[in-house]
Amino acid sequence: MKEEKTNIRGLSFNDIKEFLVEKGEKPFLAKQVYEWLWKKNVHQFSEMTNLSKTARTLLGKFFIIPAIKIHSLQISKDETIKTSFKLIDNNIVEGVLIPSKNRMTACISSQVGCLLGCQFCATAKLGYKRNLKFDEILDQVSIINKQSLEHHKLPLSHIVYMGMGEPLLNYLDVMKSIEKITSEDGLGMSPRRVTLSTVGIPDKIKKLGDDKIKFNLAISLHTANDLKRTSIMPVNKKYPLLQLVEAIKYFYKKTEGRITYEYILFKDFNDSLNDAKELAEFCKISPCKINLIEYNSTGHSKFLQTSKLKFKAFADFLESKNMIVNIRKSRGFDINAACGQLANKLNKK
């Protein structure tokens, strides 16, 4: 029976060095291999051109570098690019390049599907299949960065974990992927240019505090009313807002990091001035920013986009309370790449 090869990206620098020395190679080769894997993101040992042919053959005998592949690609009229990625087990995830005047942002996935069941999100309809490995997350970043360079002549400036899945339910691999994105032996990006978005898993938010994270944390809040939140986000039944508040206070005490709250405005559900007052009261627990987001249809008739008048009144009220408010316009709506739409057409291809 043929022995199965090992994914070399699962090995540490020291593991690679020990292997090479054991096989009679020079220890300094480990640094070169590591750079090819994590700085240059190659997927063939033959591409490691500063290694001898003997060393490349040796690595190829014992290891593989599994890679995700582009399954399909769509370009929006606003130049947003949505990519479906095929994983080695033929599962599909999606990622998005969001270009704007001052930044190139990659929106990436952390799970195949999602088990949290938020009613306004297309990914929830797929259910949950598995977590992504940290190298699969890194491959998304690498491919989207190439798209940014090819289409806009600019590298990625920001990365947001806002694609398919709940990042905090894939804690170890997500954290390892961020470490590779921000470390000098990886992509070397500032952690302040990385944002992790979560529905709010209290024990994991506290763990982020204990881990003294340097990247940005965003919470998909969408209402500061427990009954309303439970009706659209089943996770709130298990982790009501009081638990979330405690976790946020703990996180801020540990990190002094300003949290961003994401708030999609739904017509006649969470768009009244009373909803705005509840949100403003909730936001007193720690310094924060609020991203107000246009609702993007996922084919669920229960939800509609609020009016421009109500959207403005909501934002104006928050600003009158000296809150930092950012308006997030829909991007890539025509290709189902906007917030909440990922995987909407996945099973229809």
Image: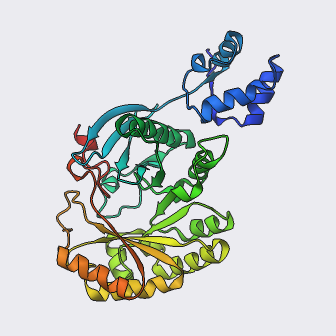
| Residue 224, picture quadrant | bottom left
Which coloring applies here?
rainbow
x, y (%) of residue 328? 32, 65
**Of residues 14 and 294, which is closer to you in this image?**
294
The x, y position of residue 45, in whole percent, is 60, 19
For the point 34% across and 40% down, which residue is it? 83
Residue beneath the point at 46% across and 31% down: 88
Residue 187 falls left or right of residue 31: left
| Quadrant of residue 124 within the rendered picture | bottom left
At 57% across and 49% down in the image, what residue appears? 189
What is the total number of numbered labels drawn onto the structure image?
A: 0
Q: Position of residue 27 (x, y in %)?
A: 81, 25
Instruction: Describe residue 156's horizontal placement relative to residue 295 as left or right.
Output: right
The residue at the far top in this view is 53
Q: Quadrant of the C terminus?
A: top left
Image height of 184 relative to 257, above or below: above
Q: Is residue 297 visible?
A: yes
Q: Which corner quadrant holds the N terminus?
A: top right
Residue 113 in view: no
Q: Position of residue 131 (x, y in %)?
A: 50, 47
Relative to 247, residue 320 above or below? below
